Amino acid sequence: MAHAVPTAGTPTGARAGTGPGTSRRTTPDVFGKKTHLLMKWAMPVVTALVYGYWVASVRRHGGPITGWNLLIGFMSVLAFAILYFAVREVARRLPREGHAALWGAFAGSALGFLYSGSGVAMFTCILASLLFAGAVTAALVYHYYTRRDAQADRAAPTT
């Protein structure tokens, strides 16, 4: 039985939206839809739980666990998860630069809130969060621009 060999610029996976002229990658999808759906919801929840625990542990400064400490941890989990889902929904509608800037702002804000609980000067928290937000934004812009579909670049008219 003969099989067609994929050539350069043709998709190797059977996903929708991977034809020529699209900006999706042409690598095969090795996970099923259930795995992607599970990770779409599990990763933000697990990340929020880790973040909430981290906030609570920083805020107690090595002291005993109290009710207020648990409350700030659970509220941090809730706020982080809600903001993560909101940023994810808004970011997918933005161009690459806006997408990267929004995720950078989210990451910088999360670090700033976490770092402010340690009792350091507010200027230090702001500086650290701005540096981190800039680094995340720059890394994501680089990531999005280096992984464009080469077929879409070839189809663009040249002047």
Image: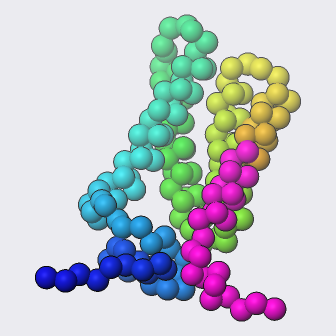
- Specify the principal SS of the magenta part: helix
Q: Nearer the viewer, residue 142 or 120?
A: 142
Q: Position of residue 76 (x, y in %)?
A: 54, 36
Residue 71 in sight here: no
Q: Nearer the viewer, residue 35 or 157?
A: 157
37 lies above or below 17: above
100 lies above or below 155: above
User: Which residue occupies 34% across, 65% down?
Assistant: 29
Confirm whether the magenta stretch covers residue 115: no
Confirm whether the magenta stretch covers residue 147: yes
Residue extending farthest left: 1
Locate residue 67 relative to residue 4 in the image: left or right: right
Question: Which residues lie in the magenta part?
Answer: 135-159
Q: Position of residue 28 (x, y in %)?
A: 36, 67
Q: Nearer the viewer, residue 40 or 113?
A: 40
Residue extending farthest top: 63
Locate residue 60 relative to residue 118 in the image: left or right: left
Q: Position of residue 78 (x, y in %)?
A: 49, 42
Count how many numbered circles sit on residues in the image: 0
Would you identify the image quadrant in which residue 159 lies?
bottom right
User: Which residue occupies 71% across, 92% down?
Assistant: 157
Locate residue 22 relative to residue 98 in the image: left or right: left
Would you identify the image quadrant in which residue 114 lies?
top right
Question: Which coloring applies here?
Answer: rainbow
99 lies above or below 43: below
Q: Nearer the viewer, residue 112 or 1?
A: 1
User: Which residue occupies 50% across, 8% down?
Assistant: 64
101 lies above or below 6: above
Q: Position of residue 113 (x, y in %)?
A: 67, 34
Please identify the quadrant where the N terminus is shown. bottom left
